Image (cartoon, rainbow, N blue to C red):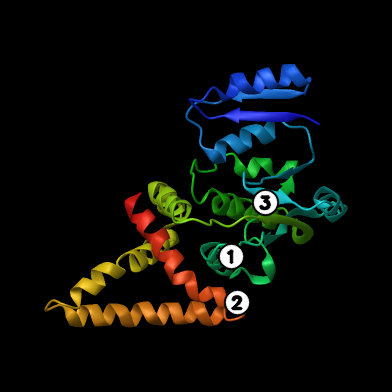
Amino acid sequence: MNIIIVDGGSDDGTPEIAKNWADKFSVPLKVIVAPNKRMAHSRIIGAKNGKGEIIVFLDADDRVSPNFFVNLLSSFQDPNIGAAHVKVKHIKSDSYLGKAMIAWERRCPGGRWPYITVFRRSLLPALECVKDMNIGEDHDRHVRLKRFCEKHKLRIIQSNACVYRRPKESWRSIFKLGERSGRSIGAYVMCYPSAFKFILWAILNASLPLALLLVMTPLKYLSTAYFAVYLAVWILFLLKGRRDRWIFLSPLTQFIVGLGFMWG
């Protein structure tokens, strides 16, 4: 086993702490300092310095199932398989906000994470020109890997490997989620113009208080039209998530995300 840490310019002494930890416990650890590199490029640098045939990209809040790697390896027995999707399950939450966030995330069909997170080392060339983004980097990676597989006649499968995720459970963490997205959305939209719909979605949710104020002004008809659109969109989402009663709190969580997005 090899542990590789790619430091993109942290100011908390991460490289020194990691090296001291490796020396203390005799762990085969390699620290690579890559200043001004964001998540996308840091992941690729780490992958290039690794030795494994199968590459898995996970986030800091992901937890894998006990047989995660066994299931992954069994999925890649066929040499014609180039990449795989993993299943995503959410850790049970006791918070009403956490329950609402889980209900929102369950919109993904079949519990499958929509982006490719597992692929063969031979697919790394597809990521050479990846955009250096903090948000949307998983979508950018997915598009490039999918195109590579289609070009080289490689299959993309659904693996039985499962990842567990804990939802955001506080007002602050949900707001921070939106704020982080707002700070990085520009680069994402420049790369994929269709992502502009995320900006419209955030504005739709965040401008609810403004619409309430407009009710008391001569622009009340504009406010009425806004509420009609707002309710129509949410009814569509609520019907899609009707199996989970907590989906009815999703407008609240998405309102908080929208405020954070506009702030960012």
Which residue reaches farthest left? 218
Identified by mark 3, the residue type is: Thr
Quarter occupied by the N terminus: top right
The location of residue 257, given as percent across then percent down, is 42, 59
Q: Look at mark 2 in the image and give the residue it sits on.
A: 244
Secondary structure state at the residue bearing disc 3: loop
Image coordinates for residue 196, horizontal then vertical, percent: 39, 61
- Residue 149 higher or lower than 236, as above or below: above
Q: Earlier in the sequence, mark 3 or mark 1?
A: 1
In the shown orientation, is residue 181 left or right of residue 89? left
What residue is drawn where x is 61% and y is 43%?
127
Marks 2, 3: nearer the viewer = 2
Please, is residue 6 above or below residue 197 in the view?
Answer: above
Of the residues tagged 3 and 1, which is closer to the observer? Answer: 1
Residue at point 13%, 76% (across, down): 217
The disc, 2 or 3, on the residue closer to the chain's N-terminal end is 3
Answer few, some or many: residues within 10 Å of disc 2's Cα (few below 14, many 20 plus, some between 14 and 19): some
Sequence-first disc among 1 and 2: 1
Please state the horizontal and vertical placement of residue 161, each as a whole percent of the image.
78, 56
The residue carrying mark 3 is: 117
* Three-letter residue code for mark 2: Asp
**Residue farthest along the front direction in this orientation:** 94
Secondary structure beneath dot 1 equals: helix
For this rendering, which residue is in front, 236 or 104? Answer: 104
CB under 8 Å between discs 1 and 2? yes
- Answer few, some or many: residues within 10 Å of disc 1's Cα (few below 14, many 20 plus, some between 14 and 19): many
| Lateral position of residue 155 relative to residue 179, left or right | right
Total number of numbered labels? 3
| Residue sitting at x 55%, y 54% | 139
> What is the three-letter code of the residue carrying label 1?
Ile
Q: Going by the image, does 180 lie left or right of 220? A: right
**What is the distance, in whole Å, between disc 2 and disc 3 at their CAs?**
27 Å
